[in-house]
Structures are given as C-alpha cells and as structure tokens.
Image (cartoon, coloured by chain):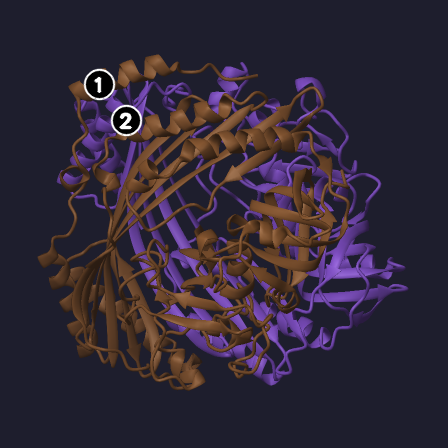
Amino acid sequence: MMARDEALAICETLLGHVKSAGAEDAIVDVQNTQETHARFADNHITTSGRADNVTVTATVWVGQRRGAATGNDTAPATLKQLADEAVQIARVSPVHREYVPTLGAVTYPAERSFAAATENVDLDARAKALAAALDVCRREKVTGAGFHNANASATATATANGNRRYFRSSEGSLSVTARTPDGTGSGHYAGDHFDLGRLDVEKIAREAVKKALASRNPQPIEPGVYPVILESQAVADLMSFLTDALDARTAEEGRSAFSAKEGKTRVGEQLFDERLNLYSDPMHAEMPAAPATPEGVPATRLSLVKGGRVEHLVYPRYWAQRQKREPSPGPVNYILESSAPPVALDKMIEGMDRGLLITRFWYVRLVDGRSLMLTGLTRDGLWWIEKGRIQRPVRNLRFNQSVIAMLAKSNVEAVGAPERRSPMMVPALKLASFTFTSTSDAI
Amino acid sequence: MRLPLVSRREFIATSSTLAAAACLPSWAEALQSAPTDKARVEAAEAALAHAATLGASYADIRVNRYRRESIATREQQVQNVQRSTSYGMGLRVLVNGVWGFAATNRVEPGAARSIAEQAVAIARANATLATRKLTLADADRVTTTWNNPIKRDPFDVPLETKIAFLLKLNETAMAVKGVSFVNSQILFVDEQKYFASSEGSRITQRLVRTYPQFSVTAADRAAGDFATRPVVDRAQLVGYEYVEDYPWLLDAEKAGNEVVEKLKAKPVVPGRYDIVVDPSQLFLAIHESVGHSTELDRALGWEANSAGTSFIKPNDAGKLRFGNTIVNLVGDRTQPGGLATVAYDDEGVQAERWHLVKDGTFVDWQTTRELAPLVGHKRSHGCLHCDDWASVPFPRMPNVSLEPAATEVTLDDLFSGIKRGLFVEGRGVSSIDQQRYNFQFGGGVIREITNGKLGGIVKDAAYQSRTPDFWTSCDGIGGKALYKLWGTSADGKGQPGQTNAVSHGCPPARFRNVTVINTGVQS
C-alpha cells in the first residue's frame, strides 16, 4: 500500500503541474487499491484473484471553469499530461456555477478503519478457513456458495489552498449461502470487519447452514399485512434508501421524501419512533470510518434523527454555502440505535403472537420517492412465528412498503442491538405491520 | 428555489471565444500515454510464458485500455465534465484444474511476471478447495482485429459541441410549462482490448459506446408533490452519429409534456389488466426474466450467494415450456448496435446468434468454455466477459432479444380488442426474485387503454407476474417495423460485483390478464 510520503509527493507533483498549466484552484488525489478475493459455489472454489491499481485525479478551475481528468499511471510525464488535460477541459467548459474554493489546511485525526491483516491476506490461512467453512456445509449435506473479500486502500489528497490529507481503510468480509440438495431450503449469513482477523468464518458458515436446514419445504401464505421481525441484515437492506434521501438540496428543491408543503422540509418532524436515533460517527469503535467527508470536511458525530425526530439533513459544501449554513461533518457511516435497552432477537420472537421472521431482502428498489415506498422480496430464510415460537418456514414474499412508515412510532415494537453491516450498524427490529403484495416460488 | 441559470447567449459567446484560444486536442494525442502495441504484446507474452513455466496448463490475458468522457448538466448549467483513462492487464491461469487471477496497472514484462507468480500462487493455495476437474470446451486459434463500425468518433467531437447538445435538450424540456428540473448526462466509452491465450489466439478489438440519458421532473411545491419521467436505457454500441441522427429534442419535449400530465394524473385502480408493453419497458422485462434465467452458471448454483439461481434446471433444455408458442427469444452477440456485441468474447470465442426460446420452449443456455461441457456442448456460445482489465472474466449476458411477428402487426392491432388495459412505456422500478420467477415492473409513463383506444396517463401503477405465466399470457407481438433496440448500461452480477452493458431488441407485445397494483397507497 502506498505510504503517506510517496502518495503526497505524487499529489505535490501533480499540483505543481496544474498550477503551471494555469489552474487557479485545484484538488488532486491519488488512490492506491488492493483487492483480494476467493469465491466458491457448490462446495468448490470457483474464482480467486487479486488486483492492484493506482488512480490519479486532477480537478481544476480556471476562471471558475471546471475540468477533471483521471488516469492510472503515476509516471512523471503522464502526470503532466493529466494536469494539462484537466486544465484544457476547464478552459473550454462553461463557468461552473457551483464552484466553491477548495479547502485550506485542516488537521485531521488519524483514521481508525485500517488493519494490516486485511491488506496482507495470508493465502494459506484463507484456504484453511474456507476449507473449514466448506466442511461445515458438507457435514450437513448442503451446498455452500460464498465470497471472501479483502480490500485495502490508501488515498492522499492535496488542494491548491493548502489542504493535505492521507487516509487508509480496509474491509474484510465473508458471506455464505447454503442450499439443501433438494432445492427447497436456502440460508444466508454474512459478516464484515475492517480487520480481517476479526471475521468469524466458521460462525458465518454455521449460521447459513442452520438457516438452510430450517427453511426446507416452505409452505405458501397469503400476501397481506403482517407483523414482522427483521434481522439486522434485512434492516440494512432497506436503510440505505432512507439515508440516501437525507440530502438537504433535493428536500429544499421539493423533490424528496423530506420535502414538506409550501417549500419547507420535514426537519423537526417526529417521523419515526421516539426511541430511534440515526447518526454518523467516524470514531465509532465497531464501525470506524474516514475522519473526513469525500469533500474533505472534517467528520465528527452528526445526528440525523434524534428521538425519532429529523434533526439534520445533509449539506455538502456548495449547498451549505448557498443556504448560508455550515457544511455537514458527515455522513461517513450510519449508526441506527435505540435509546432504550436493546431487545435480543430470541426475546422478540418470544414476544410475538403471530408474524414473520425475515433473514434478508433481495432486489430492493425505490418505487416512490415521495414516501420512500420500496419493493423487493424476502430471501434465504423466512419463517412463520406463532405464540412466541418459530413454527414453520414459509414461501418468499414480495413487499411494497414505505421505509418511513415502517419506522413510524406506531409501528416499531422492539429494537435490538446494532450489528455491523458495512457501512452501517443497524439493529434487528420488531414491527407491528409490513405489507406483502404477492408470493414468490423462488427458493 | 431555482438555481441561477447560465444564459444560452453567455454560454455560446464564452465557448466560442475559448474554443478559438484553447482548442482541446484530440484524445489520440492528448491524454496519458497508453501502452504501445509492442509493449502490450511483450507484457502479454511474458505473462503467458512465465505462467507456463510456473506450471499453468492454460493461461489467458487481457490487456485493456478504457477511455471515458462524461458530461453532466442540469437545467442550463454544466455540473461536471470528466475524462478518464484506465489501462492494465489481468492474467487468468489454470493450475491443476484450479483458477487463479492477478491484475496490475503496470503494463511491462516485469509486472507481467509478477502477476503470473501471484495468479499461480493463488491457484495453488486454493487447490484443497477444489472438488471437481475443470474442462474447457474447444476454441479456435484466432489472430484478428475488429472495431465496431462507427461513423463519427465521439472522442474527436469538440467538448463544446457535446455540452451544447445537452443544454439544448434541457432547454427544450424546460420550455414545457410545468417542468421544474432537467438532469441530462452523456457518457462515451472507448474500450480497447487485446486478448492473448496460451493456445495461441491473439485478438485486438475496439468497442465504442454512446450513452445519452436525461430525466425530467415536475414539482408542485405548494402541495409537496412531484413526478419524474426518466428517459434512459438508450445506450448503443455506436459513435457520435447517434447524438446527431436521433431526434432527441422531440423526446425531450415529449418527456416534458408527459411529466406534467403525470403529476396531475389519477392513480391507477388496482386489478387485472390486459397490458401492451412498449420496447422501452419490455426490454427490461426480457432482461430480467429471460436474460438472467437462461444463464447456465446461475442454474448450476454458481451465483447462489449473489445474483441467485434460476427456475430453469440444468437438464430443462428442449423440455421446459417457457411461454406461448409465438414467443421466440435469441441470444445474439452479433446484433448491430448491441451493447454486448463483440467479434470475440473475453476468452477468444467467436460471437454468434442462437435461440434460447424457440416456439415457446426453452431450448438452450448462455455458455462459456467452462460451462459448455457441463451440459454436453462441445463449443461455447461466447458469453465470457469482464468489465475491466482488473476483473476476473466470468459468464455474462449476451444481447437477448424477442423476435418480431412474421407479419406486420401494428400497435393498433395490439390495442384492438382490449376492453380494459394499460400501455406501459419507459423505465419504472424493476425488481425480480433470485430465481427469476416473481417480478414487479413500473413504467416511465403508463396510459389507459379502453375499448382499443389509448387514453390518459395513470400514476402509481406497476405490474406483477411470474415469468412462465407472463410469457404464456403473451398473445400478440408487433411486427418488424416496430422492433427497437434498448439496453441497460450497468447490469450487475458477480462477486466482486461487475457491471455489463447489454441490449435487448423487441417490438411491443401484448400480455393478457396481468396483475396491476397501486404503489402509492402508503405514506
């Protein structure tokens, strides 16, 4: 992985070139990435590989006209060509109406989301770990498919106004889907951590296999409105649609779920259950993130929803300047948690009279941006609960459900402890109602 | 509140002055150095030779260079102009029947030997995880060069011409009373690929794709309501002539009128409808329900952890009733303008056209050299693809298209006899399960059909069906004159995830008694 001095030296060289070519303002960055993976299916290794790359980008302004060029070669002559290209694009572009001067010097805290073990994957150790996972599958006579991934990156950035920053990050993950040979059962489980050494490979395999065996021979139920328990993966599968909608600009332009009548926004409204808090925090112990936004704004804890009330929308630098506000110090991750003590999943099940337990969702899409109505399907583990016990597996269902309505005060019955589902930490949720519109034959 | 706008006059005056002062040089000479033909050949040969020395029984390498230019605008201003270049090489090796892969952005013999060592080490380390012997179908040894035909290279067109096109398009849509916002983008991709294998093939290809798209929004801020009409999925494997020849401004005006009507439209009444689906939406139904279900790797469980499996089983070819007997669907990597069209795939297999569904029966799979022998085929259909030099090549969808009717069936013919129906145009929300049974599709614009006549727009409508039921309910297919090619530029699959650009040709078609839901009832 490219070291700080080497990466920033390339930035300085590139910055010198763009200034020489006539740029009045500029931001340049160098990113070195390393991706290592192993994929298996039908209890057999399928593909495995490694890819190394360096990406260099120069974004410049000449008379407030903007140009940007990206390459992946750090040879000195190439850097000059890249700089010239960016400046030439700027010269023939119209005035960039949303220009904001690049940041000056800022002191950032050190990043906490990088582990050397994730960068330097031990191939033999990985093979042993995956062999153990496949043994779990074979012992239970199911077929395992999965993906082991380890990514590491180092990114250096420099601006013409004196900002210099360098952050590393890493992420290791494993997901396993186990299927029964008769094709009637399927289970999925996944885990991730910035430190590959913290992945519990065998546990992930065991959980997937357990779900596959318990989901055999599902029977159909009528689509309709049911109480549900969403495991944390299922919550994560829906939450990104809500977090994506927290952009202040689209809300203030009147084309977002957070737009209100008469040109206002829904900031301050009690849209969600009063126990729910949603925030971003780069220093979170389990889910640390870069200490700066992609624009370089120092990241600190940013409360988005507090006590179920929308507290802040997200203001990038341009829109903040235009609206005479400070740019948001995030988000760089998302943590959804309850202010009440967390309720364990088994307690949620015990407390359910009748309803569904959902492992995860698949092919989730935004149907209506006004209400954050989503559609998608359950997948890899769906069970009917009655009188506090899991009774039987059921056929998958398609849902059409607003994520805002899902988290409303009247609908949230219990909240679990947040679990890491990168780039989020989200809890399991027990909900009074969730709308399903058709059944699926898919296993 | 609307943003301050750049006046059209200001833009033209500015760009003309600057164009005279600082004309942007052509890409061929301007951007970063790319590996020369000699350098990439030397690197490829070094990698293949070193892999063989290290014990690989087979190896292939792709030395690829990608140039991309994207321009994004909204209303009357340019949001972003970006050019990028990426080149590098990815080596795939087979060692004792186990694949290994390694890739680097450094295209030179030393780096080539290094990735050969990495790829072989990966394959050897994973040997204990292999449970079956891998066999590759035969492929011809080929040395050739192919470029997709284009009339005008988009990378030679001045930037200001492209910007002016987008701003004119925005201006046209914004001129419709009630339109609040327009976002438009254009992306050009130049993919230069060099393939070399240990079996002796050496193939050079250049593929140029042009991706125009825009979206029009009408917002009623007093009521806190808005509607959007996306016009996307128009990308093709063509040059800049596509921008110049197609009547984009008519589309922009039409989209503006439609979104204003859509904002005030009445909600759909849920129920059963006969629907006629335009190529601008049917292409997506084909993609999801036919394109993905006929991928053999999915049927074998290789995508079980990600994209899913298929409702079609590996031994179903020639036996499974897929749809009505009028339904014929083909895989085709030779289709002119098709986003997945090539001369040779990413393991050197020649592109071809073949039936996936013939007279309503599923008859064949999408295959690669590794997959073909698993269903008793001696040759691959040429479906191996990687989206980047750094990506592992794996099975990807060819262009999959619905054949038109033998006679000239018109749109009015399809509407006739429908008492209560809907006409679905353009992309709405799409979602389908992991075995490609249950799907739900919306539309950009959905109009009522009453007693064979087209009526006004309804909003909040989406249709749901089950793939075999849907294609069995197809009782009308348009003729050749209505056949159009649409495509998706970012079809996701695999782990690590890769995207694939793929087209689907079809005329409009009629489907009977389909479930339609109202998606706007919750809040």
Q: For the point 62% across and 65% down, which residue is it?
A: B467
Disc 1 residue type (three-letter): Leu
Q: In which image quadrant can residue A389 be found?
A: bottom right
The residue lying toward the viewer, choosing from B97 and B143, is B143
The residue lying toward the viewer, choosing from A44 and B447, is B447
> Badge 1 sits on which subunit?
B
Q: In which image quadrant can residue A409 be found?
A: top right
Q: Are marks 1 and 2 on the same chain?
A: yes
Q: Do the residues bearing badges 1 and 2 touch, measured as CB atoms within 8 Å?
A: yes
Q: For the point 16% across and 48% down, which residue is it?
A: B34
Quarter holding the C terminus of chain A is bottom right
| Disc sitting over residue B506 in the figure | none
Provide residue A3's location: percent of width, then percent of height.
29, 45
Mark 2 falls on what kind of element?
helix
Per the image, the residue denoted by label 1 is: B18
Per the image, the residue denoted by label 2 is: B160
Disc 2 residue type (three-letter): Glu
| Colour brown belongs to chain | B
Q: Which of marks 1 and 2 is nearer the N terminus?
A: 1
